[in-house]
Image (cartoon, rainbow, N blue to C red):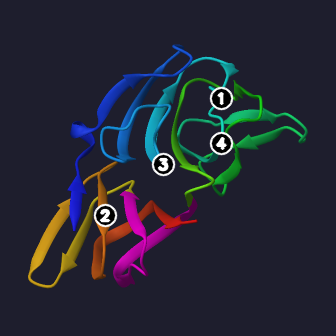
Amino acid sequence: MHIVRSEDYRRMRWKNGDGETAEIAVFPPEAGLSDFDWRVSMAAVAADGPFSSFPGIDRTLSILEGEGMTLEIEGKPAITLTTRSDPLAFPADVPTTAALVKGPIVDLNVMSRRTRWTHRVEKWHVEGQHHFDAPGGVTMILTLGNLRVDAGHHAVELRRHDCIFIEDVVLLTTDMPVEGYLVRFTKS
């Protein structure tokens, strides 16, 4: 297991300069915005505007906090995402603009370079105990609440917005229902 605490996320300006992102993980490590193979980040969005374009990249977006936002992706009907919505996958190199529904939001942004990696993002709920197996590739969990993760003789407590990379079977335990996101990267 590899844990990344939310307070340790790398803070950086958006590619278009209009906001700030908390970079959770990037591969290869220390890659920049133009040369990553995959990237996971959270962004606080406080105003309407265009998304940054990332040539050759696929993106999946999820709303973590706030009332949501409406996306206009070129060639598709407008779609409103909220915290109840499933993650939305779309090409990051297609012109896209966002309009906030009511006030600021925080989103989860997962991207992969389509010639090298694919990714899948799933929203999940855990209550009580649940065994989880990482099937290969790169598997991470971002939790939206307190969660205990046991692997063999090692256990760790995760807090809201912490992330853990897992490579084997783990036991997830919580005293109350917890939501989170499961992200899997597989080489193309």
**Element under disc 1:** loop
Q: Which mark is residue 37?
A: 3
The mark nearer the N terminus, 3 or 2, is 3
- Name the front one of labels 3 and 2: 3
What amino acid is found at the position of numbered circle 4 in the picture? Gly
- Name the front one of labels 2 and 1: 1
How far is disc 1 from disc 4 in space, using C-alphas? 9 Å
At 59% across and 23% down in the image, what residue appears? 103
Circles 1, 4 touching at the beta carbon (< 8 Å):
no
Viewer-nearest residue: 139 or 61: 139
Q: Which mark is residue 165?
A: 2
The mark nearer the N terminus, 2 or 1, is 1
- Left or right for 98, reference 151: right
From the image, tell me which residue sits under label 4: 56
From the image, tell me which residue sits under label 1: 53
Q: Position of residue 99 (x, y in %)?
A: 72, 25
What amino acid is found at the position of numbered circle 1 in the picture? Ser
The mark nearer the N terminus, 3 or 4, is 3
What amino acid is found at the position of numbered circle 3 in the picture? Asp
Q: Position of residue 72 (x, y in %)?
A: 81, 32
- Left or right for 33, reference 103: left
Q: Magenta residues, as a range?
A: 118-142
What amino acid is found at the position of numbered circle 2 in the picture? Phe
How far is disc 3 from disc 4 in space, using C-alphas? 10 Å
How far is disc 2 from disc 4 in space, using C-alphas? 25 Å
> Residue 80, located in which quarter of the rendered image?
top right
Q: Position of residue 15 (x, y in %)?
A: 52, 22
The mark nearer the N terminus, 2 or 4, is 4
- Name the front one of labels 2 and 4: 4
**Element under disc 4:** loop
